[in-house]
C-alpha cells in the first residue's frame, strides 16, 4: 500500500520493446510526474563498464562505478528518454546492440542490482514517479498506486525495435534483432534475482494489436481511477477490492 507521506508511483514492467518506455513517458508527461527508465540505468552501467574495460563478472567494481555517478532521466515524448550521466548526454550511446547485450549480462549480477536499488529508489520524488523496467512493481516499488505489465508478440516487438534503431542511425538486421530479443527474454525471465514476471496485482496489457495512443489512454485512465480511489479510500487500486476495468486485460 502506498504510504500517504510517500510520493505515488506507477510501475510499467515488461519485456524489451513492449512499448513500456513510450507509454510510461507519455503518462509521466501527462501527469507532470518524474520518470525512471530503469533499463537506461543498467545500460549506463554497461557503458561505464565498457569504457573502464571492466567485465560483467566484476560485479562489485561495477557497482562502485555507479555509486558516485549522477544519473538523470527525463521523459522526452519519444521512444527513448533523455539520460545524462555525470552531465554527459548518453541517451543515444546506451542504445546500441553491444551495450544492450552487456546490460543484459550485467543485470544478472546481484551486486549490480543491489547497488542500483538505491539509485532507483532515490528517483521517487514529489509529485510522483512513473517507473518502467522489469521489476518495478515486484521489487522496487511494491506499494505502487497502479501497476502494469505490458507485453506483445516477439515478432511485433522485434519489428518495433528494428524501426527505432534504424531511425536513430544504428545498423541492425531484423533477423539479428529477433535473435537478440529472444536471448534477452530468456535471460530476463530465467535469472534467479528479480526475474521478469508480472506483479500479482499488475494489470496485463498485450499491445500486439494496439496503437500506442490506445495503450496510453488505457493506462492513463486506470491511473486516474487508481489515484481517485487512493484519495477516497486511502488505499491504492492494486490489491484492493476496488474494481479496476482493466484488471487482467489481455
Ligand atoms: O529495458 P531495457 O532493454 O532498456 O533494459 C536493459 C537491460 O536491463 C535488459 O536486459 C533488462 C535489464 N533490466 C533489468 O534487469 N531490470 C530492470 N528493472 C530494467 C532493465
Image (cartoon, rainbow, N blue to C red):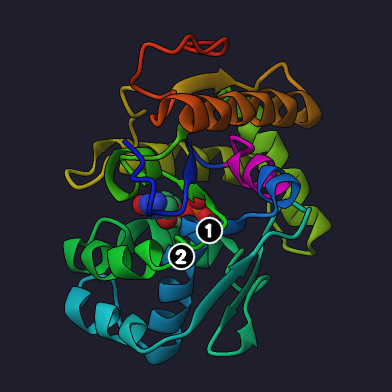
The Cα–Cα distance between marks 1 and 2, rounded to whole angstroms, is 7 Å
Name the residue nearer the viewer: 27 or 128.
128
Using residue 1 as the reference point, say whether residue 27 is left or right of it: right
Give coordinates of residue 38: x percent, y percent: 46, 57
Q: Secondary structure at mark 2?
A: loop
Q: Name the residue located 45 percent from the left edge and 88 percent from the top edge.
A: 51
Q: Which mark is residue 123?
A: 2
Residue 250 showing in the rendered view: no
The quarter of the picture where the N terminus appears is top left
Q: Name the residue located 73 percent from the left edge and 51 percent from the top edge.
A: 29
Q: Is 19 part of what is drawn in magenta?
A: yes
Q: Residues within 10 Å of mark 1 (few under 14, many from 20)?
A: many
Using residue 182 as the reference point, say whether residue 143 is left or right of it: left
Q: Is residue 50 shown above or below 41?
A: below
Give coordinates of residue 58: x percent, y percent: 20, 77
Do the residues under discs 1 and 2 have CB atoms within 8 angstroms?
yes
Residues rendered magenta in the picture: 17-26
Q: Which mark is residue 183?
A: none
Q: Which residue is mark 1?
A: 36
Residue 224 showing in the rendered view: yes
Q: Nearer the viewer, mark 1 or mark 2?
A: 2
Q: Residues within 10 Å of mark 2 (few under 14, many from 20)?
A: some
Q: Name the residue located 70 percent from the left edge and 35 percent from the top edge.
A: 159
Give coordinates of residue 194: x percent, y percent: 25, 45
Q: Is 233 part of what is drawn in magenta?
A: no
Q: Is residue 118 shown above or below 139?
A: below
Mark 1 or mark 2, earlier in chain:
1
The quarter of the picture where the C terminus appears is top right
Name the residue nearer the viewer: 147 or 38.
147
When asked about the image quadrant of residue 109, the answer is bottom left
Give coordinates of residue 2: x percent, y percent: 36, 41
Q: Name the residue located 67 percent from the left edge and 40 percent from the top edge.
A: 23
Amino acid at each position: 500500500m502506498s504510504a500517504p507521506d510517500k510520493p505515488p508511483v506507477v510501475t510499467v514492467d515488461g519485456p524489451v520493446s513492449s512499448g513500456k518506455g513510450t507509454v510510461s513517458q507519455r503518462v509521466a508527461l501527462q501527469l507532470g510526474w518524474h520518470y525512471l527508465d530503469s533499463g537506461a540505468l543498467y545500460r549506463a552501467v554497461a557503458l561505464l563498464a565498457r569504457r573502464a574495460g571492466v567485465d560483467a563478472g566484476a560485479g562489485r567494481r561495477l557497482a562502485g562505478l555507479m555509486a558516485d555517478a549522477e544519473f538523470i532521466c527525463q521523459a522526452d515524448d519519444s521512444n527513448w528518454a533523455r539520460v545524462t550521466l555525470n552531465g554527459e548526454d548518453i541517451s543515444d550511446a546506451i542504445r546500441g546492440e553491444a551495450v544492450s547485450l552487456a546490460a543484459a549480462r550485467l543485470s544478472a549480477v546481484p551486486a549490480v542490482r543491489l547497488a542500483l536499488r538505491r539509485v532507483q529508489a532515490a528517483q521517487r520524488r514529489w509529485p510522483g514517479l512513473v517507473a518502467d523496467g522489469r521489476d518495478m512493481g515486484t521489487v522496487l516499488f511494491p506499494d505502487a498506486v497502479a501497476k502494469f505489465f505490458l507485453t506483445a508478440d516477439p515478432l511485433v516487438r522485434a519489428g518495433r525495435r528494428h524501426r527505432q534503431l534504424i531511425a536513430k542511425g544504428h545498423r541492425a538486421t531484423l533477423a539479428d534483432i529477433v535473435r537478440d530479443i529472444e536471448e534477452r527474454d530468456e535471460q530476463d525471465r530465467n535469472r534467479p534475482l528479480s526475474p521478469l514476471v508480472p506483479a500479482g496485482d499488475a494489470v496485463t496489457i498485450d499491445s500486439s494489436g494496439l496503437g500506442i495512443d490506445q495503450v496510453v489512454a488505457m493506462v492513463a485512465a486506470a491511473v486516474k481511477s487508481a489515484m481517485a480511489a487512493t484519495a477516497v479510500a486511502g488505499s491504492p487500486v492494486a490489491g484492493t477490492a476496488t474494481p479496476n476495468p482493466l484488471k487482467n486485460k489481455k
